[in-house]
Amino acid sequence: MKAWRLSELGLPWDVLTLEEVASPEPSPGTVRIRVEATDLNFADILQCQGTYQEKRRPPFTPGMSAAGEVVAVGAGVALEVGQRLVGSTADGWGGYAEEAVVRADGAHLLPPDIDARSAAGMHVTHGTAWFALHRRGHLQPGETVLVLAAAGGVGAAAVQLAKAHGCRVLAAAGGPDKVETCRRLGADAVIDYTNDDLYATVMAATDGRGVDVVYDPVGGGYFDIARRLVAFEGRLLVVGFASGTIPSAPMNHVLVKNYSIVGVHMGAYRTQAPEVIDRCYEQLWELQRSGTVEPLISATIGLADVPDALRGLFNRTTTGRVVFAP
Ligand SMILES: NC(=O)c1ccc[n+]([C@@H]2O[C@H](COP(=O)([O-])OP(=O)(O)OC[C@H]3O[C@@H](n4cnc5c(N)ncnc54)[C@H](OP(=O)(O)O)[C@@H]3O)[C@@H](O)[C@H]2O)c1
């Protein structure tokens, strides 16, 4: 089978090579799938560089999530050949390949009416947004939510899920095309935070009160502005650090303003509380079936185009999810 392999850490478009390799044997607790769709995640770029929280030693195939049909089953796994699922990849055999190895725990069988491309487009994006907003953020209908990088993968999903929950959504993104994307997603107000004053615009839009919930996949300087925008008893959801800078917060500010800084690590639920992951995807498939949410898939690419597409994601030029489908 063909697979992108990385033999040293670095930027993926510099270090990945497309190789013909033998299909891997699935280890205990995993299955091998024929890849039907893989979502391109910012975290894959970090993992190639060795800066992601879950480290992987070369050689490996990146692509942390994938959807497809089971073709081989490892020891101790109740799944069967022929079943179709989406899940997190394992053992260094990720989704940027014709076949991948997927962890059986936390994998989800695809209902017959959910296609692999949609499942890949929603697996990490909407899963993360669901855990952040509902499980960790306890979002209530009627609350106001500020989403940063709102035209991106996990950001666009948060706009959709917060709107579906009856919230007012302020969407911040970089550039006129991206804010237009946010408007089409249903945001109530949009902010081009590369040109407009994020603090002043959000304060004006909320009569000086601030927002109940901030959803932040960016970190860096935007986090510092965002924490000053959290209203009394609000929640600042720490989702990621796409800016490359992990921020810090002064605890006197947190104390005086009575707000919470809430960490979000969806992957940890695989071992800590897998039943919550099942509940999350049951709800997400239902929302998709009813037409309430739809994955924002901006491009579907072939295997040869994966490194270039990752470069686009790194350079802030993508919206929603880019999906690789063989
Ligand atoms: N906590 C979790 O469980 C979890 C799960 C999945 C992903 N994440 C994290 O969430 C973040 C977003 O992931 P994603 O895959 O959905 O990516 P993405 O949002 O599609 O792409 C990253 C976006 O971040 C914004 N950004 C701001 N400053 C940037 C900079 N200096 N360089 C690059 N991008 C910058 C850009 O949007 P603008 O141009 O609009 O600013 C860019 O499009 C990543 O840090 C990822 O690791 C966390």
Image (cartoon, rainbow, N blue to C red):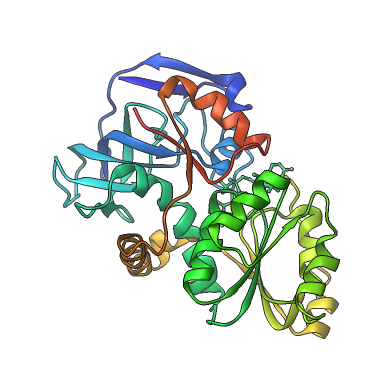
The answer to whether one can see residue 82 in this image is yes
Place of residue 153 in the rendered image (x, y in percent of width and height, measured from the top left): 54, 49
Relative height, residue 5 to residue 178 (above, below): above
Place of residue 189 in the rendered image (x, y in percent of width and height, measured from the top left): 68, 65
* Closest to the observer, 192 or 124: 192
- Residue at 55% x, 78% y is 139
Place of residue 111 in the rendered image (x, y in percent of width and height, measured from the top left): 22, 55
The answer to which quarter of the image holds residue 120 is top left
- Residue at 68% x, 80% y is 234
Q: Quadrant of the C terminus?
A: top left
The answer to whether one can see residue 265 in this image is no
* Closest to the observer, 305 or 151: 151
Counting every numbered tag in the picture gives 0
Place of residue 180 in the rendered image (x, y in percent of width and height, measured from the top left): 64, 51
- Residue at 19% x, 44% y is 75
Relative height, residue 53 to residue 213 (above, below): above
- The answer to whether residue 41 is left or right of residue 313 is left
- The answer to whether residue 203 is left or right of residue 187 is right
Q: Quadrant of the N terminus?
A: top left
The answer to which quarter of the image holds residue 19 is top left
- The answer to whether residue 249 is left or right of residue 294 is right
